[in-house]
Amino acid sequence: MAVLVGKSAPRFNCKAVINGEEIVDNFSLDQYLGKKHVILFFYPKDFTFVCPTELHAFQERLADFEKKNVAIVACSTDSEQSHWGWLQLTKAQGGIQGITYPIVADTNKTIASNYDVLDGNYEYNDDGELTATGELVAYRGLFLIDKHGVVQHQVVNNMPLGRSVEEAMRMVDALQFFEERGEVCPANWQAGKDGMQESHAGVASYLASH
């Protein structure tokens, strides 16, 4: 499992469904550089059971994330047509109608591979091409990326284990608190609580570079 924290988030340019209905060809996280923090989360498959609960949970808190200047972006290895079709079904039908944040179509599996959340038996041949036997889908990976495109937090769950949107929000609050005040956040820190002064060289280096 690759640890991407402290490293530049792998870049990509691919098809996605935005605003719940529009398919675009060249979606990239580059549009947020210097402007917004990003939560990029991977889920295994469209038309499943746990996955829509996560997508709806992020949509329910989307306005709160947007107030904090955070973009939410979802990604799976399904096609953009599959995403679009799933968006046509209501929540009662097991669909994700009403989701408005971008859903990326990682049909060639390279995004999930570069973020090291791709499950299945695969390898790269001598030409750098991904070859696989059997189905390849993404684990429930989540990455918090700062305005400079650097990963500040990551968590990866196995397929049956749904994530906590509240914990994702807590990580956003912690990162922004640190960026604004230069104070670190102790265990179980919540927005509104005090931070801690830290003289570690890594903190000074982070602040100097941002």
Image (cartoon, helix red, strand yellow):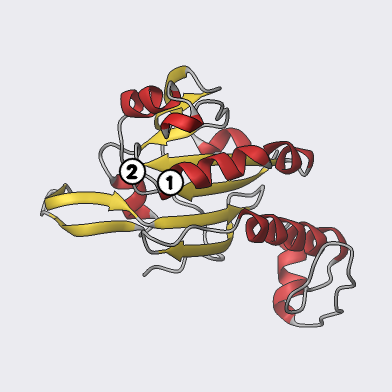
Q: Which residue is at a point 34% across and 37% down the rendered structure image?
A: 47
- Residue 161 appears at what percent x and percent y? 44, 62
- Residue 77 appears at what percent x and percent y? 31, 41
**Is label 1 in a helix, a strand or a loop?**
helix
Query: Residue lying furthest front in this view?
Result: 92
Left or right: 7 in relation to 89: right
In front of the other: 46 or 196: 46
Q: Which residue is at a point 79% across and 60% down the rendered structure image?
A: 179
In front of the other: 140 or 36: 140
Mark 1 neighbour density, 10 Å: few (under 14) some (14–19) many (20 or more): many
Determine whether 158 is above or below 34 in the image. below
Task: Locate the N terminus by quadrant.
Answer: bottom left
Whether residue 9 is visible to the viewer of this picture, yes or no, is yes
In front of the other: 3 or 45: 45
> In which quadrant of the rendered view does residue 32 lie?
top right
Mark 2 neighbour density, 10 Å: few (under 14) some (14–19) many (20 or more): many
Dot label at residue 45: 2
Whether residue 13 is visible to the viewer of this picture, yes or no, is no
Left or right: 136 in relation to 165: left
Question: Which amino acid does the dot numbered 2 rest on?
Answer: Lys
Left or right: 41 in relation to 150: left
**Is label 2 in a helix, a strand or a loop?**
loop
Determine whether 193 is above or below 82 in the image. below
Determine whether 44 is above or below 6 in the image. above
Q: Circle 1 is placed at which residue position? A: 51
Q: Are marks 1 and 2 in contact (CB under 8 Å)?
A: yes
- Residue 122 appears at what percent x and percent y? 16, 57
C-alpha separation, residue under disc 1 versus residue under disc 2 = 7 Å
